[in-house]
Image: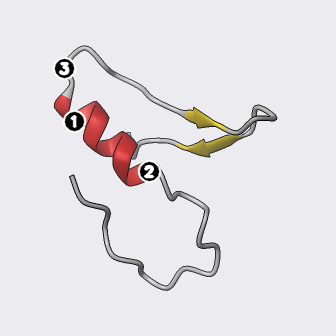
Amino acid sequence: MTAPKATGHTEPNKGELNWLLDELVDRVASIRKAVVLSGDGLPTGSPRT
């Protein structure tokens, strides 16, 4: 797995883990949804589906 190249978004940290979650959901058949939460419970990443 490799991270996609930066596209020049104005918010560099937003969606930083989305590519990883996309790969995880695509590769592991028993996973349907995934989310990454910050220490204070705010979502910081989610897959495209």
Residue tagged by mark 2? 18
- Residue at left offset 39%, top offset 46%: 48
Label 3, secondary structure: give it.
loop
Mark 2 is surrounded, within 10 Å at the Cα level, by few (under 14), some (14 to 19) or many (20 or more) other residues, namely some
Name the outermost residue toward the right: 40
- Say above or below: 2 vs 46: below
Residue 27, position as x, y percentages in the image: 18, 32
Residue tagged by mark 1? 26
Residue 20, position as x, y percentages in the image: 36, 47
- Residue at left offset 31%, top offset 68%: 4
- Residue at left offset 45%, top offset 29%: 34
Q: Amino acid at mark 2?
A: Asn
Mark 1 is surrounded, within 10 Å at the Cα level, by few (under 14), some (14 to 19) or many (20 or more) other residues, namely some
Name the outermost residue toward the top: 30
Q: Quadrant of the C terminus?
A: top left
Mark 3 is surrounded, within 10 Å at the Cα level, by few (under 14), some (14 to 19) or many (20 or more) other residues, namely few
Of the numbered discs 2 and 3, the one sitting upstream in the chain is 2
Residue 30, position as x, y percentages in the image: 25, 14
Residue 17, position as x, y percentages in the image: 47, 51
Q: Relative to 5, is 36 on the left or the right?
A: right
Q: How is the image coloured?
A: secondary structure
Q: CA distance from mark 2 to mark 1?
A: 12 Å
Q: Amino acid at mark 3?
A: Ala
- Say above or below: 23 vs 35: below
Q: CA distance from mark 2 to mark 3?
A: 18 Å
Label 1, secondary structure: give it.
helix
Residue tagged by mark 3? 29
Of the numbered discs 2 and 1, the one sitting upstream in the chain is 2
Q: Amino acid at mark 1?
A: Asp
Q: Are marks 1 and 3 in contact (CB under 8 Å)?
A: no
Q: Quadrant of residue 11?
A: bottom right
